[in-house]
Image (tube, rainbow, N blue to C red):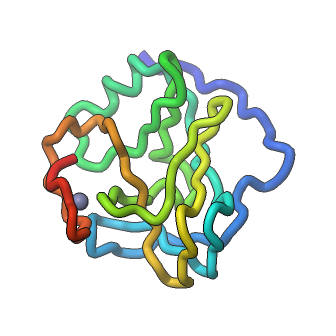
Amino acid sequence: MTAAPDRPRRPPADPQKYRVVARPSTIDGQGAFADEVIPARKKIGEIRGESISVREARRRARGLQRIMIVEVSERRAIDAAQSLDALRFTNHSCAPNAVLHIRQGRVEFYAIRDVAAGEELTVAYGESHHEGRLVCRCGAPRCVGRL
Ligand SMILES: [Zn+2]
């Protein structure tokens, strides 16, 4: 069964506030890298994608190594697999420089501290669909070791 995607709601302005590019990462696969300086606490941008049910999200996540699905409420999730937003490649770090906020169904990223141009953007995933099956390679001194 394929659920029809919700009609995209047009955001009032471009949600991408700073330039972010996807490049190969030493953490995992592709990463999202700041392409300019991002000051602490500034909104970096958003991940947009297909709006699906959490049930469908869990079905899609099963068995995938790289998951680009974010649950935005108890019932809805965003699948960014087809998204063009470079932030969808944001890797996990146990010492992240960015944080993800879910606001009214939107997946927003904010800088925790000043981020240098060229630095990889990372967030702490928290509860993930990987359920501790993945080894963390973030390299932070206090890495917890698993996702
Ligand atoms: Zn780690």
User: On the rendering, which quadrant does ligand 1 occupy?
Assistant: bottom left
Q: In the rendering, at what x and y percent does residue 86 appear?
A: 53, 62
1 vs 100, left or right, is left
80 vs 130, left or right, is right
Q: Quadrant of residue 89?
A: bottom left
- In this view, 52 is above or below 85: above
- In this view, 8 is above or below 124: above
Q: Quadrant of residue 44?
A: bottom right
Q: Residue at (22%, 47%) from the top-left corner?
A: 147
The one nearer the camera, 18 or 53, is 18
- In this view, 50 is above or below 98: above
Q: In the rendering, at what x and y percent does residue 103 appear?
A: 64, 35
Q: Please state the total of marks drawn on the protein image.
A: 0
Q: In the rendering, at what x and y percent does residue 97 appear?
A: 46, 65
Where's the N terminus, which quadrant? top left
- In this view, 39 is above or below 94: below
5 vs 88, left or right, is right
- Furthest residue in direction right, as rendered: 12
Q: In the rendering, at what x and y percent does residue 55 appear?
A: 39, 17
Q: Residue at (54%, 69%) from the top-left corner?
A: 113
Q: Residue at (54%, 72%) from the top-left corner?
A: 21
The one nearer the camera, 92 or 9, is 92
Q: Residue at (40%, 67%) from the top-left corner?
A: 31
Q: Quadrant of residue 12?
A: top right
